[in-house]
Image (spheres, rainbow, N blue to C red):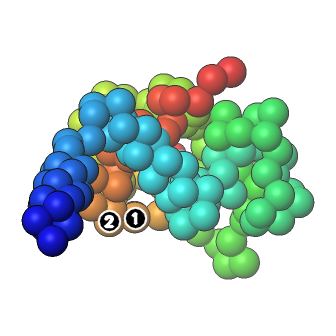
Amino acid sequence: MKTLARTSIALFALFALAQTHPASAQDNAKASVDRGKYIVEHVAKCGRCHTPGNTAGEDEHDRRNWLMGGPLQIQPTYPVTNWALVTPRIARRPPGSDSEFVRLLTTGISRTGEPPRPPMPNFGMTRVDAESVLAYLKSLTP
Ligand code: HEC
């Protein structure tokens, strides 16, 4: 009986230890990149506009030019005077500083102090999500 109690206590202690073991900085960085990838590919669909030649539809991305910017593939069905014709490259190093990037994705205000031209959406992301997207973009290799 005593042995059983001791074993239970030891197991409980081990369990508690495993639960409180802090994630390493590396784990956190990987989790951030993974979250950013999920947001970019499956939620915000940045590639729809920031990947050139992507005419195959929402989920068919041209991986060779993934997020490399170029001629915008979509047009409005009614006249919009300031509709953008090209998108910038956002892979690896998006335009502007990190804080400008986070401000854009959280508030919809770009480096110029104005919203970017349509159809760049105002995402209204949380800071954590915007930072994850940035971490993912920076993780991309040529
Ligand atoms: C529906 C199309 C569309 C989608 C989706 C889209 N963008 Fe854009 N984005 C644009 C256009 C168009 C511009 C250029 C705007 C301009 O020239 O003023 C732009 C500009 C930008 C810029 C440059 C802003 C600056 O300060 O110059 C960044 C950074 C950016 N987008 C990031 C993203 C990210 C990250 C995502 C996904 C989370 C995304 N965009 C999704 C269309 C889009």
Within 8 Å of ligand 1, the CB of disc 1?
yes
Callout 1, which amino acid?
A: Phe
Residue found 66% across the figure and 51% down from its top? 47
Residue found 81% across the figure and 33% down from its top? 64
Q: Position of residue 54 (x, y in %)?
A: 81, 52
Q: Which residue occupies the extreme bottom position in the image?
A: 78
- Numbered disc 1: secondary structure: loop
Mark 1 to mark 2: distance in Å? 4 Å
Q: Position of residue 82 (x, y in %)?
A: 54, 58
Q: Which quadrant holds the N terminus?
A: bottom left
Q: Is residue 29 above or below residue 58?
A: above
Q: Which mark is residue 52?
A: none
Q: Badges 1 and 2: C-beta atoms under 8 Å apart?
A: yes
Residue found 41% across the figure and 46% down from its top? 31
User: For mark 2, what is the residue?
Assistant: 124
Q: Which quadrant holds the C terminus?
A: top right
User: For mark 1, what is the residue?
Assistant: 123
Who is closer to the viewer here, 134 or 19? 19
Callout 2, which amino acid?
A: Gly
Within 8 Å of ligand 1, the CB of disc 2?
no
